[in-house]
Structure formats: structure tokens, C-alpha cells
Image (cartoon, rainbow, N blue to C red):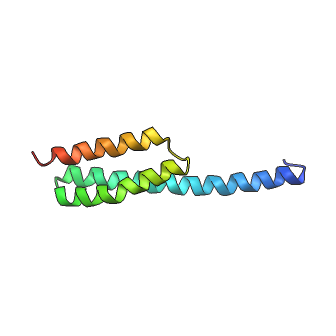
């Protein structure tokens, strides 16, 4: 258990940051899942709309340090490629 005032504050900060990061991670996963579900259903218009919503969420998640920048970029790129492939 934390004994000093600064250690107690650090514990509070860590708890708060953990909750925020969990929320951001969940939001990003949900956004990606919505795109994948639209792709699986074969609904191109819904997939495009879901991708438009998911891309900024992933980028914002990486800017906040929850995801690595290249991880977010890779996820957006792969989702975009899958949506584009639906046209054929």
C-alpha cells in the first residue's frame, strides 16, 4: 500500500488513466468490429460509413498513446483494402 502523499496521488492517477485507456480501447475495438460486420454482411455502403467513423477513432486512440501509431495506421489500411475489395 502507498505510504507517501505522492505515492497515493500516483495510485489515483494510474487508476484514472487505466479507466480512460480501457474506454478508448473498447471504443476502437467496437469501431473495427462494426466495419468487419458490415464487410461480412456484404453491405458495402454500411462498410464505407463504418470505416469513415472508425478511422478517426483509431487515429485518436493512437494520438493518446493507447495504440501505437503504426498499429492504428495498419488497421485502417487493412480495413480500407477490404472495403475496396468489395466493389469487385
Residue 56 lies left or right of residue 6; in this view the side is left
Q: Picture coordinates of residue 61 (x, y %)? A: 49, 52
User: Which residue lies at the image location 12% right of the left edge and 49% below the top edge?
Assistant: 87
Q: Picture coordinates of residue 80 (x, y %)? A: 27, 46
**Residue 45 found in image quarter:** bottom left
Q: Is residue 78 visible?
A: yes
User: Which residue lies at the image location 80% right of the left edge and 55% below the top edge?
Assistant: 9
User: Which residue lies at the image location 67% right of the left edge and 57% below the top edge?
Assistant: 16
Q: Which of 28 and 53 lies nearest the eye of the viewer?
A: 53
Q: Is residue 31 visible?
A: no
Q: Picture coordinates of residue 63 (x, y %)? A: 51, 50
**Residue 12 found in image quarter:** bottom right
Which of the image's four quarters has the C terminus? Answer: top left
Q: Which of 32 and 55 lies nearest the eye of the viewer?
A: 55
Q: Which of 58 and 40 lies nearest the eye of the viewer?
A: 58
Furthest toward the left, the residue is 88
Count of numbered tags: 0
Q: Is residue 71 above or below residue 44?
A: above
Amino acid at each position: 500500500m502507498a505510504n507517501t502523499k505522492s505515492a497515493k496521488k500516483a495510485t489515483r492517477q494510474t487508476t484514472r488513466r487505466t479507466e480512460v485507456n480501457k474506454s478508448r480501447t473498447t471504443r476502437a475495438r467496437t469501431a473495427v468490429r462494426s466495419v468487419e460486420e458490415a464487410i461480412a454482411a456484404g453491405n458495402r455502403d454500411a462498410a464505407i460509413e463504418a470505416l469513415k467513423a472508425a478511422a478517426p477513432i483509431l487515429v485518436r486512440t493512437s494520438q493518446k498513446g493507447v495504440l501505437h501509431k503504426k498499429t492504428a495506421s495498419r488497421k485502417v489500411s487493412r480495413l480500407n483494402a477490404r472495403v475496396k475489395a468489395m466493389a469487385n
